Image (spheres, rainbow, N blue to C red):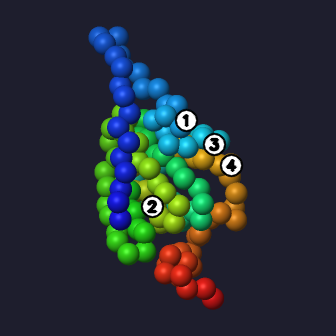
Amino acid sequence: MQIKLIQLQKHGDERGALVALEENKNIPFPIKRVYYLFGTQQGVRRGFHAHKQLKQVAIVMRGYCRFHLDDGKEKIELLLDNPAQGLLIEPLVWHEMYDFSEDCVLMVLADDYYCESDYLRKHEEFINIVNGETK
């Protein structure tokens, strides 16, 4: 599995830092939805799904969290802890987030609106789809 971390250009001086997010420039798709997670309790895992078509970029705005990524052939664990770096999550990648720092704020940019039918919430169904098997 090829993981793509997007380096976001950070601008700043002694007053602080700024990162601009622009669709079809440093974010490789049109942005239709933005959401963020915060206040996640220690020991809690989030996610547990893949998308059929949705593309996302996850950016940790504060703190850190870990990602478990699975494309059906390979599994990767990744620490996200840099607000000037985004993790591109392509369609058909099972993802789980865990080990949230107490101050973690995780923002996600998506290329489409929420659509429940795009979610694969059962890992077995996800594996069947990525392996070309249908029930």
Label located before the other in sequence (3 or 4): 3
Specify the amino acid type for callout 3: Arg
Q: Which x, y percent locates residue 32?
A: 65, 42
Displayed quadrant of residue 36:
top right
Give the residue type at disc 4. Answer: Tyr
Q: Are the residues at dot 3 and dot 4 in contact (C-beta closer than 8 Å)?
A: yes
Disc 1 versus disc 4: nearer the observer: 1
| Residue positioned most to the front | 24
State whether residue 58 appears in this view: yes
Residue visible at 58% across and 70% down?
121
- Residue 33 circle label: 3
Say which residue label 2 marks.
96
Picture quadrant of residue 76: bottom left
Position above or below: 96 against 125: above
Q: Amino acid at mark 1?
A: Glu
First-in-chain label (2 vs 4): 2
Q: Would you say the residues marked 1 and 2 are in contact, meaning their CB atoms lie under 8 Å apart?
A: no
Give me the residue at 55% from left, 35% from top: 23
How far apart are the alpha carbons under marks 3 and 1? 11 Å
Which residue is more in the foreground, 30 or 101? 30
Check whether the beta carbons of the residues at disc 1 and disc 4 lie within 8 A of each other: no
Q: Are marks 3 and 1 in contact (CB under 8 Å)?
A: no
117 or 4, nearer to the observer: 4
Q: Which residue is mark 4?
A: 113
